Amino acid sequence: MYMPVLAGYGGYEIDTRLIVFNWEGAQEPAGFRLDLMRPNGERVSASRHEAPSGGSTVIDMSRAAVGQLLPEGVGLAKDRARPSRGRLAPAVLPPRDADLGNDHAREEGPQGPAPARTAALPLDLPDRALAPAGGGLLLVRQHPARADARPALGLAERGRRNGRSSAAGDRVRAVRARPLHEHVDSVAAGAKAGSVRLDPATFKVAGHMLRHDPEAQLWRVQHL
Amino acid sequence: VARSASLERSPWLPSYAWWAPPEEYALTVVLSSFHSTTQAEGEFEAYLRGFAGSGQALWEHETGPYRHGDEVAVELDALDLPAPPSPSGGVIEVHVIRTDRAPDRPVDCLGQWVHAEGREGGGYLIPTIPIRGQEKRVQRDDLQVLPGVMSDSGVETEIVLVNPIDVATEARLTVSSAGGLVLDTEPFEIPPWSAWRGSLSNELPRVRRMLAEDGGVGSAAVYSSHKILPFFGFRSPGLALTCMDHAAPMFA
């Protein structure tokens, strides 16, 4: 499960808390590992947490807690072991005079990137005009890595230990952030409405849409 | 509003969302063909209906045919529709039918999106959700969770429960603090084809005190006698509800 972490993104007073809700199911704590990644996919921290049975774990991802690890002010958290029950979801906490957003985590594909196929459903993001200079699209993209990349080698070694095919070495995930307004002038100008589509739909993508109205200090963070 | 028998019998089933009070939100139903298929031969028709308290629709709107590659945005303000009589709003049915082929499964649903712009700021984008024909496998239909609710002096969580079936549905809310303290509402009834709307602190007056030790943050669950469609969003004092999202079922 992936979710965006905003910690001073764009120089704004924006922080994030992540919440794991362990409800119903086995009456025992749900343990999980949480990785924090920069937008370039570099993992900058890994920590273990437990959500108590019937309760929630609140994880501080504020500027004070992780700002030093995220020089871009934005990153991604990845829940490495989905709890048997419950979901991981962040609340984006604004300054008190601002509005706020919420978001659900997005689930990653069970086996990494699917092979290229033309009939896959493309990512589609219906929306209206994005705020001028504030619209962005944060994509968590699973893609093949170079065979000699360290994560690929690690996965291949783990696959051998677990008796799985070394083809797992192709299944390294990484993260890309694509500020939409930096790529599409009409979006930056707030002049276009419509959908965003990734073509070809080669990879399974978990994505998030970030919208910010700097005048109203209004953030909206929603999953695709 | 009478419907054709072929529409009622279509294996393409409708999906639903909150018909928010039009004095608060300008709603646009976004019908994206790209979201429905990658097949260039895809052809569609969409029928929108508004319900408020009974299975008799208050209004219906046909989009006419559209094709793969088209994007249709239906602004409800432009349709001169009656407002839902309840301040809680009503139910929007979004029934998209693919006219060039039947579903691969016996029934299927082409979910779309409702975009809401607050008249005084704020807003949200929510998916429409089917009540029948969904492919997701869930462990149970009577429980959905809202991870990460907030209730303190600066932020309040608002909840909308949509009941798009012909019978009244009983529901109750449970809020859990990070430490596992729990508050429950009494069961309450949502009439057929209606929306229920409330805030945590109105429904559970002690919730702010309970969540205070955890920074005003906890999580919530919605129990219901039939499957309902829960949505939740956040509101700061003096500002509009924003960032509404749907609750999460327990996936199998």
Image: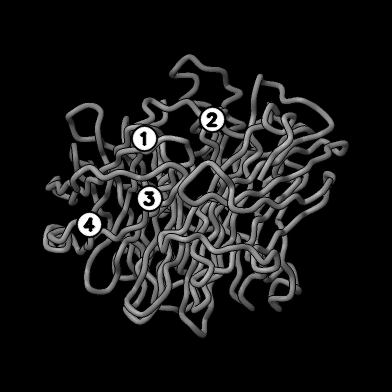
Q: Tag 3, which chain?
A: A
Q: Nearer the viewer, mark 3 or mark 4?
A: 4
Q: Is residue A90 above or below residue B143?
A: below
Q: Earlier in the sequence, mark 4 or mark 2?
A: 2
Disc 1: host chain: A
Q: Amino acid at mark 2?
A: Arg
Q: Between tags 2 and 3, which lies in front?
A: 2
Whole-number angstrom distance, CA of label 2 to CA of label 3? 26 Å
- How crowded is the residue under tag 1: few (<14 C-alpha within 10 Å), some, or many (20+)? few
Residue A51 lies, in percent from the top left, at: 23, 42
x 14%, y 45%: residue: B180
Between B89 and A29, which is closer to the camera in this rendering?
Answer: B89
Residue, disc 2:
B132
Residues at discs 1 and 3 in contact (Cβ within 8 Å): no
Q: CA distance from mark 4 to mark 2?
A: 29 Å
- On the image, the x and y values in percent for residue A120 come to 72, 35
Q: Are the residues flagged by discs 4 and 2 from a single subunit?
A: yes
